[in-house]
Amino acid sequence: MNRPAENIELTDLYLAGLAEQEHFIQGDEAAALGAIFAGCTFFGGYPITPASEIAEVMARELPNVGGYYVQFEDELASISAVIGAAWAGARAMTATSGPGFSLMQENIGYACMTETPCVIINVQRSGPSTGQATLPAQGDVMQARWGTHGDHEIIALAPSSAQEAFDLVIRCFNLAEEYRTPVILLMDGEIGHLRERVILPDPRTVEQTQRRKAREGEDVFGGAIVPPMTEFGDGGFVHVTGSTHKEDGLRDVQTQSVHDRLVRRLVAKIEQAREEIALVDVDSEEGAEVGVLAYGATARPAKGAVLRARSEGRSVSFCRPVTIWPFPISRIQEASRGLRQLLVPEMNLGQLAREVERFVDCEVVPLSKIGGVVHSSQEIHAAIVEATDSC
Amino acid sequence: MLKGLIDPEFFEAFTSGEADESQHLPVYGTRDPLLGLCPSEVEEESGPAHHRLLRYLRKEVLPTTFCVGCGGGTVLNTFAHAIDEMHIDPREIVCVTGIGCSSWIPSPYFLCDTLHTTHGRAIAFACGVKVMRPDMKVIIIAGDGDLAGIGGNHLIHAARRNLDLSVFLVNNFIYGMTGGQVSPTTPFGTRTTTTPYLNLEHPFKIADVVAAAGGSYVARWTTYHVFQLMESMQNAINKKGFSFVEIISQCPVSYGKMTGTSDPVTLLKQLRDASIHVDDTDGMSEEDLEGKFVVGKLVERQRAEFGDGLRQLISERRESISAELDRGLRQDTSALETGR
């Protein structure tokens, strides 16, 4: 943003050159390249397995496109600098994994409260604590939703392939600008380290949602469900605070109605856009009584198991939420209509299954697997066979 | 020049109207040497509501929340004077603060872009701002609990990194906003609400820590030494690189209530009497300096500034890419010309 035209031209030529090459890369690398194509201009990070490759690619590529890579002393500083950079005009991102994601939670809340557009990639690994540091998991589904304190809404997207990691990071940046909020790419270590062919687009065709800037006198913290933003140096003397504030940004931490109005709006701006943000890959079968719902790495063996079951004449529906938060309620309800059982394999002890259960009419069966190993297609197939035989 | 508080000769000449200000105070211009005001510019009506520096404050949030006798007001006044004398447009300033009484000094009171962040993270947020906006003055004002305690790691790493930030750490030796708990700078043996049987820990000499960590400009003054502090703030703002001024300040309420006196004047006199200029410490041992505040400029050094490094790197990478693209285009053209 705000880059001189000749810089954009040189950047486009450089990225077009990258796009012409063959890329057989990890999900982490694809996500980093996605950020570069999305116009990311600032990355603040701290090394952590299995997300370090994102920092490495950002360190290599950002200077090539006129952006800034800074490695900080910890994850607290990384997310802080990202938010500061966003207010200074950057499209800013950080990347981490479980322990670092935990450290970032306070300032993710700050970004929600101050309505700061930014992107956080969490390449989930097995926890709690240091857990199985090098092994994948999907244990941060609820941390992404509720990790920071206080009422808030969050946007989180989960890729199932390296290509999707690239594509979804671009979407994360655009959602962050559109709704002025932090957006999380909730990747798992399996996808982060999975090496696949990734096709990069012509950079000029990549949509970049521009920041809507406030006109003089326009409120930056109210007056619209998603208020326009200002940036440091615009001359508006903006006051940015994580304390409860009025529409003009100035604190009012005592008046009940001010807090109520602010927090309800912050929740409502995401809530009312639930359908727009919802990305769900649905592959339903007419008359199926059993369905499988899976996301991230787990969706791949799940899809394989569903296809195999179908080839054996079993009727099985498949559904893959790409948007995890806000939970795509109506799309999942639609996809589960008529089912008697919905199997939910995930690499945790049933975090998303519980959310699914709140909204669907059928029985929800969690197929939990932890310990750093992705479900095999056979395991999920066996569960499908058992379910279809009993239905 | 300003090692003492005020040159007594100048004070006499000034009050009798005979002072040649340009000769005595070439840096500061004209001002009342006691109040820090410039009499020629004070409006006819006197009193705080007509202070000529009010234009630097967000009037709608006044009066300040500082307790009577707090050093925060002195720091705000000194900071406003520093900015005013430097003729810096406040639209070119971003003040970044954390949590605690001292963070309120610029935020919300100082009328510039203000980023009031979470506890301890002000410097980290400021790094993001400064990298993106090297043209703006990015100034951090916060307290000892915020910058030396919970945010201590960011402080030493920012000093090491040497990004062009100006940090003014207001050290009142206590967590004041939460009611007077022991802080990382509370002197050994001090009674606080969480050291009711006296503090068993040793304090940071925080300016010395920053000097050792690589700060480009490091100084220490107190709220008693307002002119020296103002000059030091200006030097810090002008210095390219990480600059740091520790401002020893008084907290008559939360600190004073446990340590013997809540009288601000007595506390200020204690700061004065305990201060010793760095130039006067030659040959003094650590024991000699026990309980003293070594004031003055502790360090000034030239080191490559981090933001310059980042921009240099970008420019080199872009030039190299540009050259590669040119070569590629020439090859394409020559291929066309030779009909291949």
Image (cartoon, helix red, strand yellow):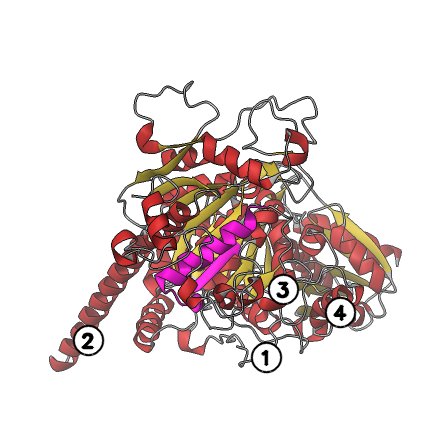
Where is residue B288 shown, x and y percent of the image?
A: 41, 20
* Residue drawn 27% across the image and 44% down it: B303
User: Which quadrant of the figure has residue B252?
Assistant: top right
Which chain does the residue under circle 4 lie in?
Answer: A
- Which amino acid type is shown beneath numbered disc 1? Glu
Query: In what quadrant of the picture does the C terminus of chain A appear?
Result: bottom right
Q: Are marks 2 and 4 on the same chain?
A: no
Q: Dot 1: what SS? A: loop
Q: Which residue is mark 3?
A: B61
Q: Which residue is mark 1?
A: A218
Which chain does the residue under circle 2 lie in?
Answer: B
Which chain does the residue under circle 3 lie in?
Answer: B
Residue in front for this viewpoint, A187 or A372: A187
* Residue drawn 30% across the image and 21% down it: B283
Q: Is residue B77 magenta?
A: yes
Span of residues in magenta: B70-96
Q: Which marked residue is nearer to the observer: mark 3 or mark 4?
A: 3
Q: Which residue is mark 2?
A: B332
Q: Is residue A98 above or below residue B203?
A: below
Residue in front for this viewpoint, B97 or A108: B97
Q: Dot 2: what SS? A: helix
Q: Dot 3: what SS? A: helix
Q: Which marked residue is nearer to the observer: mark 3 or mark 1?
A: 3
Q: Which residue is mark 4?
A: A261
- What's the CA distance linking mark 2 and mark 4? 61 Å
